[in-house]
Amino acid sequence: MAIGKEIRAKIGSIKNTQKITRAMEMVAASKMRKTKDLMQATRPYSKKMMQIIRHLAHANPEYKHPFLIQREVKRVGLIVISSDRGLCGGLNSNLFRKTLSQLIQWEKSGIQVDVCTVGYKAGGFFSNLKKPRLVGKTVKLIDTPHLDDVIEIIKIMLDSYHENVIDELYLVSNEFINTMIQRPSIYKLLPVSAVEIEEGLRGHWDYIYEPDAKEVLDYLLIRYIESIVYQGLVENNACEQAARMVAMKSASDNAGNLIKELQLIYNKARQAAITQEISEIVAGAAAV
Amino acid sequence: MTMTVHVDIVSAEKEIFSGLAEMVFAPAEMGEVGITPRHAPFLTKLNPGEVRVKVSDKESFPFFITGGILEVQPHLVTVLADTAIRAKDIDEAAALQAKALAEEALVERSEKMDYATAQAQLAVAVMQLRTLDRLRKRGE
């Protein structure tokens, strides 16, 4: 029977696609569990690090580290963390949209921008843009990233901060709220500034440093930048897998609906064909 | 009632201790320090060695860290360790082996390990063994 051949072929191809999306969903779910564990494991460290740095911003060190001094802003540095692969919903495009609106604001106030990207997606996006200068990029991150992967771009940015090329440094990445929600965020890394006054830190005070302020602060601040960027990387990874899982789930569901609809059309067509055939036979018999 | 201070010990991999303590001992770069509650703000690098949290006269928790940062606020002590484990979990055989390996590398100046790494590994291994020794002497 030649009836509905096209429809059957269509149903078959959608079923195949559904198989793929379902497999990708399951892979993403298992990877998400892994990356989420890693993210939660490293979170306390970066949280504590941020806390110490906040305390430090309230202190009045006798040694003024360049990372603690506010300068007039002429050019800012941006580290953008994205995923390597697509098919993860609006994760990357949301991030880029947020970045773009910030870029426009900067442009209005006459501030220039240097960008370092992590991941293929950000690399592709920013090399197509004219305005911000792309100064470094790194790609091919695996699911368990190492600090070594980003150390190079951190160094590029810190060097240009030391040479007064950039006056502020920001980290752009996705924040993992829960499996359904990932929020793009822009976090100011440098210079370290006191945002809110914490209880008990008012007044003029300073740390006792051992061995001396310069050595401790140098070590601590580098550590701080590294740990925050690394945390951003790990968190973005978890976001990517979560977003992909959700996107693939809705793709599988969609395919299911489509198959149902097509099956209905196919059945109707078949029914109509049979009815027609019978009435033809009956009409033929009556004529004899 | 004795005074206590909140202590947090985190390593790059996980949070390893969080709670109140009477005193904290840590291997600061310029020598071991003991931190009591209401200590003045203090910031230092840590060497490999034992961090001991004294919760009460009877109870204390020893940890081994491979280095890190110590921050002290009057009401808060934070140890940011590179890696940290409970002192009881130190693998003595592995430490001995690491020590032997590092010493060998230092003597031979082999190409397998460069001098700085060998020295760092030796320091960690030696401190692990010393921590275990101290643990035994205290009868834990």
Image (cartoon, rainbow, N blue to C red):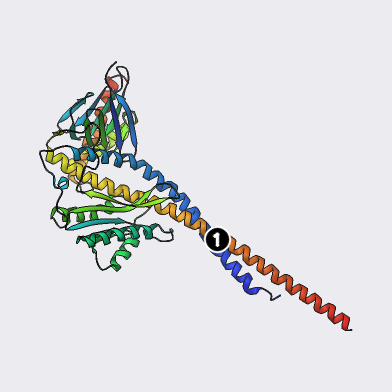
Q: Quadrant of residue A55?
A: top left
How far across and how far down the image is residue B126, in percent?
Answer: 23, 32
Instruction: Please identify the quadrant where the C terminus of chain B is shown.
Output: top left
How far across and how far down the image is residue A143, in percent?
Answer: 38, 52
Q: Quadrant of residue B79?
A: top left
Instruction: Please identify the quadrant where the N terminus of chain B is shown.
Output: top left
Secondary structure of the residue carrying numbered label 1: helix
**Residue A7 in view here:** yes
Towards the viewer: B13 or A185: A185
- Residue A11 to residue A118: above or below: below
What residue appears at the point 49 percent right and 57 percent down from the top-left corner?
A: A248
Chain on which label 1 sits? A
Three-letter residue code for mark 1: Asn
Residue reaching furthest to the bottom: A288
- Circle 1 residue: A254
Relative side of A270 to A284, left or right: left
What residue appears at the point 29 percent right and 42 percent down from the top-left corner?
A: A46
- Residue A218 to residue A97: above or below: above
Residue reaching furthest to the front: A108
What residue appears at the point 15 percent right and 48 percent down from the top-left corner?
A: A70
- Residue B6 to residue A241: above or below: above
How far across and how far down the image is residue A14, in percent?
Answer: 57, 66
Residue reaching furthest to the left: A62
Towards the viewer: B12 or B122: B12
Residue reaching furthest to the top: B1
